[in-house]
């Protein structure tokens, strides 16, 4: 509020309050304070650093969760409502040297209690402490129009027309007084703007209401402004979360498309196996790789070999890999279709939410989504031979799995010398685990690693108590003591 509007407010409050007692002073939140007088209640909300005044019905004020403030002035009579010309301040002068000073200058706005000019209390609680009560007048003499910060742009325009800066100090004071007297009697309009409600001296594109009484105008304006801002803030917060989720899905979509593209572009394992079988005579003994012409004759295919295996054994190895490659492509297609469906569903959810136009429905939608949101676990779970098996979802998840979701009597498994998931056989009762169960779970551990395409993979295992996380180690890296090793065929599931 500007200085003229504050002075106008003080004039109305003087009519309402002088001679009445302050019956109650309490807060129901860290930003709202209620002052209840004999026939009148005043609510002040310090919202976003500004003070908003409302005049609620005293009989309808909140009864519960009240925290009393300014206790020493309760029961005191209001002797005067003091204003300071051209300054954004109102003082309630009460009995026994008590003062409630309303400092309404922007983000440092507060209501401070003084007794005999000494600071007693302030609201909001985190307000800067103005220790000594001072009655100082704002000096306008000697100041140019640009220095009069309390004026609205429309006020300045009126004074420019009267060549304010060219006048002497006495004339300037007269011009300011004339402007103030005019503004103090002007009708007030609550207007709806593009993004917020405004309180003005004229009707604009969307006028909501007009008032002669400043208390009625401020009450209407404050209720509309705060509720509209809370509405926008709540809606935008939830929309921001939805858009964040859409971005995350979009990233997954690009990753899935890239993965499928790579699978489609790469020479298939089966093709490599067929080329080896058709060109065995060209392959030298103990060769580490061979370059062969594709069956269509349009490209050369480089095939890595295990030098200790015969050409036929290398071909067999690629045939085995080919079985997994086909499964990977089918999985990639299914995964891509699922993500595309999720993306479209999220777009529709955002579009529908953008149409919601009442705060109750927005909160209901947001609360419902929060309630439905599952707590994300760092592992996927399955059951083998009656034991729960936990498989880490990623490097950081592996760390969280070990730290928060295991006991020292569990069994830990991991593919040897390659990156992969940490796998846990849950065993809080320290039961005897059958070696066949270890073999089954080791196959799972091999599958969830970089060794998944091998015909045989080495997997190490040990008790969870022998796994340590070195200080400063990268996510997923651990130190293993007393490990054992087993060779298994990687499998996604076992009987």
Image (cartoon, rainbow, N blue to C red):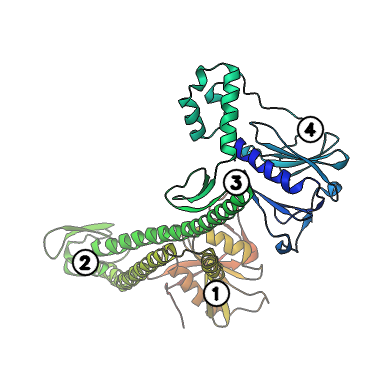
Q: Is residue 201 left or right of residue 44?
A: left
Q: Earlier in the sequence, mark 3 or mark 2?
A: 3
Q: Earlier in the sequence, mark 1 or mark 4?
A: 4
**Gap between marks 1 and 3 measured at Cα:** 51 Å
Residue receiving disc 2: 276
**Gap between marks 2 and 1 measured at Cα:** 39 Å
**Gap between marks 2 and 4 measured at Cα:** 95 Å
Q: Nearer the viewer, residue 123 or 448?
A: 123
Say which residue appears at 46% left-offset and 83% top-offset. 495
Residue 418 visible in this rendered orientation of the protein: no
Residue receiving disc 3: 48
Crowd around label 3: few <14 · some 14–19 · many ≥20 (10 Å): few
Q: Of helix, strand and loop, which one carries label 1?
A: strand
Mark 2, mark 4: which one is toward the viewer? 4
Residue receiving disc 4: 133
Residue receiving disc 1: 389
Q: Is residue 198 left or right of residue 352?
A: right
Crowd around label 4: few <14 · some 14–19 · many ≥20 (10 Å): some
């Amino acid at each position: 509020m500007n200085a003229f509007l504050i002075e106008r407010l003080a004039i109305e409050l003087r009519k309402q309050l002088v001679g009445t007692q302050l019956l109650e002073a309490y807060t129901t939140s860290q930003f709202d304070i209620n002052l209840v007088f004999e026939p009148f209640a005043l609510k002040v909300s310090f919202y976003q650093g500004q003070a908003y005044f409302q005049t609620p019905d005293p009989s309808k004020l909140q009864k519960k969760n009240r925290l009393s403030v300014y206790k020493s002035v309760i029961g005191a009579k209001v002797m005067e409502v003091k204003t300071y010309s051209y300054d954004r301040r109102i003082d309630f002068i009460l009995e026994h040297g008590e003062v409630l000073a309303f400092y309404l200058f922007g983000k440092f706005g507060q209501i401070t209690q003084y007794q005999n000019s000494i600071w007693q209390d302030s609201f909001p609680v985190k307000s800067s402490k103005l220790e000594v009560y001072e009655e100082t007048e704002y000096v306008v003499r000697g100041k140019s129009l640009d220095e009069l910060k309390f004026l609205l742009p429309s006020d300045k325009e009126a004074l420019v027309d009267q060549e304010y800066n060219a006048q002497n100090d006495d004339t300037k004071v007269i011009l300011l007084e004339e402007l103030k007297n005019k503004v103090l009697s002007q009708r007030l309009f609550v207007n709806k703007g593009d993004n917020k409600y405004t309180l003005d001296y004229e009707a604009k594109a969307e006028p909501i209401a007009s008032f002669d009484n400043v208390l009625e105008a401020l009450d209407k304006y404050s209720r509309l402004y705060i509720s509209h801002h809370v509405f926008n803030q709540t809606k935008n917060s939830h929309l921001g979360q939805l858009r964040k989720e859409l971005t995350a899905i979009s990233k997954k979509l690009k990753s899935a498309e890239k993965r499928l593209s790579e699978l489609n572009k790469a020479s298939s394992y089966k093709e490599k196996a067929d080329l080896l079988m058709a060109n065995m005579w060209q392959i030298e003994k103990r060769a580490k790789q061979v370059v062969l012409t594709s069956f269509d004759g349009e490209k050369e295919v480089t095939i890595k070999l295990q030098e200790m295996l015969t050409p036929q054994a290398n071909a067999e190895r690629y045939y085995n890999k080919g079985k997994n490659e086909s499964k990977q492509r089918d999985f990639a297609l299914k995964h891509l279709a699922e993500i595309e469906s999720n993306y479209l569903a999220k777009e529709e959810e955002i579009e529908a939410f953008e149409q919601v136009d009442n705060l109750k429905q927005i909160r209901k939608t947001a609360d419902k989504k929060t309630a439905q949101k599952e707590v994300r676990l760092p592992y996927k779970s399955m059951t083998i031979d009656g034991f729960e098996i936990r498989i880490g979802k990623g490097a950081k998840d592996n760390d969280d799995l070990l730290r928060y979701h295991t006991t020292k009597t569990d069994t830990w498994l991991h593919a040897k010398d390659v990156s992969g998931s940490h796998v846990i056989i849950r065993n809080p009762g320290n039961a005897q685990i059958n070696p066949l169960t270890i073999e089954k779970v080791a196959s799972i551990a091999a599958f969830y690693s970089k060794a998944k395409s091998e015909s045989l993979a080495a997997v190490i295992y040990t008790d969870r108590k022998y796994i340590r996380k070195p200080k400063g180690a990268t996510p997923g890296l651990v130190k293993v003591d007393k490990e054992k090793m087993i060779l298994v065929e990687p499998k996604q599931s076992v009987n």
